[in-house]
């Protein structure tokens, strides 16, 4: 089945130790998104790609970076994780919005713990 | 600024009772509104979008531009409806990225 896959599902890292989360999709969608969701909060958009065009949200910390080497894969790099970065990280994909928004397809998420 | 407000963090109803999950928004222009649902241990998935004007799993939602609301309704709740529900807004102003409300946890008890 076409889907959005995130690896790993659970990630534990140490304070300040760089970590990379990965997302892959078999939907061949143009757009990929990374959201951060902290406990009991709404998913918050960090950044998104329209094909290779990177769009950073204004309030996304510089500590968060992203790479999209091809259509299928997208990575979230946290250069120096702090305790406040512990959260569920959601990857999503959609078609290019064009004249309107399309449904976003979400991965299962990666739960990041920072010790 | 665009904002989505879901005033109820938790909503508990009995099976067979009507349910309404409230969503209000603020947006300059013509937004697109969605309801996403997350069942226990499952991924977030689309339930409804306002432009479709369809009923999914017995749920409906009407966009009321005058009241800037997009409430989710179902006349007879079922136990399997228990889940987390997120109202979300999208529009050209934000490059069509989703802006989520904080979510309402619906619990349907027998």
Image (cartoon, rainbow, N blue to C red):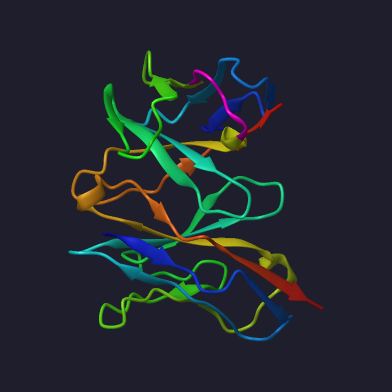
Magenta stretch, main secondary structure class: loop
Given the current orientation, which residue lies at the most extreme right position?
A: B110
Q: Looking at the picture, how far across and down is residue B57, in whole percent?
A: 57, 68
Q: Which residue appears at 53% of the width and 21% of the height?
A: A22
Where's the C terminus of chain B, which quadrant?
bottom right
Q: Which residue appears at 28% of the width and 21% of the height?
A: A52
Q: Quadrant of residue A11?
A: top right
Q: Which residue appears at 29% of the width and 50% of the height?
A: A101
The answer to whether residue A80 is magenta is: yes
* Magenta part of the chain: A78-83
Judged left or right of residue A114, residue A49 is left
Q: Looking at the picture, how far across and down is residue A18, in whole percent?
A: 56, 15
Number of numbered markers:
0
Give the vertical position of A26 relative to B49 (above or below).
Answer: above
Give the vertical position of B26 relative to A24 (above or below).
Answer: below
Give the vertical position of A103 relative to A83 (above or below).
Answer: below
Q: Looking at the picture, how far across and down is residue A92, in whole percent?
A: 46, 37
Q: Looking at the picture, how far across and down is residue A13, in whole percent?
A: 67, 21
Where's the N terminus of chain B, which quadrant?
bottom left
Viewer-side residue, B34 vs A28: B34
Q: Quadrant of residue A67?
A: top left
Confirm whether residue A50 shows in the render.
yes
Q: Quadrant of residue A88?
A: top right
Judged left or right of residue A107, residue B33 is left
The answer to whether residue A17 is magenta is: no
Q: Which residue appears at 71% of the width and 71% of the height?
A: B107
Confirm whether residue A109 shows in the render.
no
């Amino acid at each position: 089945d076409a889907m959005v896959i995130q690896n790993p599902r659970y990630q534990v890292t140490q304070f300040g130790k760089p970590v990379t989360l990965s997302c892959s999709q078999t939907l061949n969608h143009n757009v990929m998104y990374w959201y951060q969701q902290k406990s009991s909060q709404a998913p918050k958009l960090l950044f998104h790609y329209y094909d290779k065009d990177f769009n950073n949200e204004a309030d996304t910390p510089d500590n968060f970076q992203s790479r999209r080497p091809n259509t299928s894969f997208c990575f979230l790099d946290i250069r120096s994780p702090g305790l406040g970065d512990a959260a569920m990280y959601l990857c999503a994909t959609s078609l290019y919005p064009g004249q309107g928004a399309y449904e976003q397809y979400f991965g299962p998420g990666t739960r990041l713990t920072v010790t | 600024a665009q904002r989505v407000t879901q005033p109820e963090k938790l909503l508990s109803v009995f099976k067979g009772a009507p349910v309404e999950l409230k969503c209000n928004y603020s947006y300059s222009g013509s937004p697109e509104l969605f309801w996403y649902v997350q069942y226990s241990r499952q991924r977030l998935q689309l339930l409804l979008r306002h432009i479709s004007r369809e009923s999914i799993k017995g749920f409906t939602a009407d966009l009321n531009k005058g009241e800037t609301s997009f409430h989710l309704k179902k006349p007879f709740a079922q136990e399997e409806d228990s889940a987390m529900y997120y109202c979300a807004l999208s529009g050209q102003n934000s490059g069509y990225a989703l802006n989520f409300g904080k979510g309402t946890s619906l619990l349907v008890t027998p």
